[in-house]
Image (tube, helix red, strand yellow):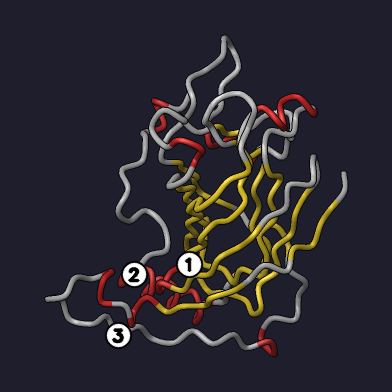
Amino acid sequence: MWILAVAAVAGLVTLGLMLAEVGPFEPEIELPPAPFDPDRYDQEPEPLVLSDIAATTTHPPDGVETYIPLNMVDDDPTTAWRSDGTRFPGGVGETIDLFLAEPVWVDAIVIANGFQRDAEAYTASARVKRALVTFDGGVRFVINLLDEGRQLQIVELDEPMLTTSVRVEIMETFPGTNGEDVAVSDIELRGRTADADDAALARERAELLPGAGRGVVMEPPAAWG
């Protein structure tokens, strides 16, 4: 499978400075800074372990074939998550929440865009074109993906991000030929496990302003399959 390195990091914003996220009458959230120290992490980035994954909606099953969010983390391009296009036409506004098994420094996001089972499935559903990625502490940026067929796309961050969760909110899609759903076959976070001091800092930041799980009611696991 081909791999594309996507240079698509832009618009780094700290949401602790954006009162719209906490309400005009709420005190500004003061977050402890989380600078990355490369001298403490000399290992190469590797796939990070998730404890859970969720999506705002899920497409109904087609017979025995399901499109649950867990399909995005099974390392199998012949399965995929698909959204319910009746609720979010074209997939715009959908969110995918990734919860890490332990605090980490994220270096890159790897995405198998669309339903990569075969060429017909790939074009049938919409594919992600632009998405807003949010980490703990309200740090976020926009990624732009390509519509280059069945291959992996790697989005490398300018610097590692300390977090316990990541939200991917779909902002724009490449249209599919069959309906209004959007599909993602696989998604992976790569980076390094945080040491004890950074893990404590990550949990403190997540308690104040988590990257994922805020503002959207996710479908319970029982509704996924």
Quadrant of the frame with the N terminus: top right
- Within 10 angstroms of label 1, few (less than 14), some, or many (20 or more) residues? many
**From where the camera sits, is residue 130 visible?**
yes
In the image, what residue occupies the spot 68% across and 50% down? 111
Q: Is residue 41 above or below residue 99?
A: below
| Residue 26 figure quarter | bottom left
Residue 163, percent across and down? 49, 69
Circles 1 and 2, Cβ within 8 Å, touching? The answer is no
Residue 5, percent across and down? 79, 62
Sequence-first tag of 3 and 1: 3
- Label 3 and label 2: CA atoms lie apart by 10 Å
Q: Nearer the viewer, residue 77 or 35?
A: 77
Q: SS for tag 3?
A: loop
Per the rendering, the mark at residue 209 is 2
Left of 137 or right of it: where is 38? Answer: right
Which residue position holds label 1?
135
Q: SS for tag 2?
A: loop
